[in-house]
Image (cartoon, helix red, strand yellow):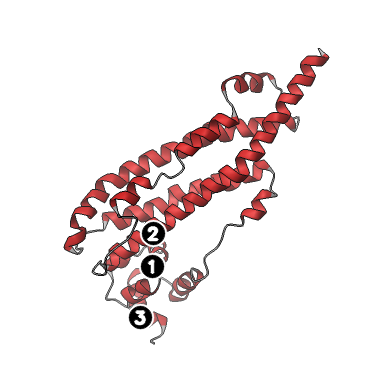
Amino acid sequence: MPEIQHRTISELVAQNYVHASVLYHFGVKFYDYQTNTLSEVCKKHGLSINAVIRGLESVEEPLVTNELQLVSYPVDLVLEYLTHTHHLFVKKRLPYIAQLIDGLENVNFRYKSLSNDLKQVFPLFVEDFIHHIYEEEDTLFTYIRMLASFLAGESVGSRLYYKMERNAISEFALEHEVHENEMEGLRKITNGFKYCDEADLHIKVLFDELARFEEELLTHARIEDEILFPKALQLERQVKFKFYETIKQN
């Protein structure tokens, strides 16, 4: 087997589809250089071959979210983790998938119609997805931070009291279930992200990326359901009890 720098881009991506995302973050669209070697591409783009190789090797052992560790975190750190994940989705994951879809041109005839559909559907998905997560940060996350701030003695309760009359963690949780799998529409038109043997490497990379993104979203939703909401419910109960004790004393 030739050394990694002498292997073609198509060979490297076929070995591990995630290699395509590493190349993307170095400014290289893999499908434009499939017959070029890694060394040739790095030279053309003025990239450090060693830095690119380290990037490619780093994805061989994917990072796993330590959900057990998150359980022990205070709610403000859980919120920071979730907000950071939102940022990664919007700034890295979605632009990369959008680039893969935009670059779908010379594909097997079986995927011509699908590639056109994806070019129309995916921007709508992105728009709806971004609206949903920013709305979640502005409403749910803000409300939880207000609960935590009040219990920590960092804010007065008057504003929070009226906020609680219009909001409840249980209602946020029910609404969250409706958005549990935002990828359902994309899953349907791609047959569950499954491709036939004749599929181009580009299709294989795209479908693998969509499947990985769906798994990340499901993990993200599970962290909110199983870690964030229970912590938030406990905070809300403590705040209600504190209000009750204050009213009783007056």
Residue neighbourhood size for the residue with mark 2, other residues' Cα within 10 Å, grouped as few (<14), some (14–19), many (≥20): many
**Residue type for callout 3:** Arg
| Residue position marked by numbered label 2 in the rendering | 209
| Residue position marked by numbered label 1 in the rendering | 17
Residue at horizontal 43%, vertical 45%? 181
Q: Looking at the image, do the residues carrying marks 2 and 3 touch, with CB atoms under 8 Å apart?
A: no
Q: Residue furthest bottom?
A: 1
Instruction: State which tag comes first along the sequence, 3 or 1.
Output: 3
In the rendering, which numbered label is found on residue 7?
Answer: 3
**Residue type for callout 2:** Glu
Instruction: State which tag comes first along the sequence, 2 or 3.
Output: 3
Q: Looking at the image, do the residues carrying marks 1 and 2 touch, with CB atoms under 8 Å apart?
A: yes
Give the image location of residue 5, x and y in percent: 39, 80
226, 114: nearer the viewer: 226
Instruction: State which tag comes first along the sequence, 1 or 2.
Output: 1
Residue at horizontal 44%, vertical 47%? 90
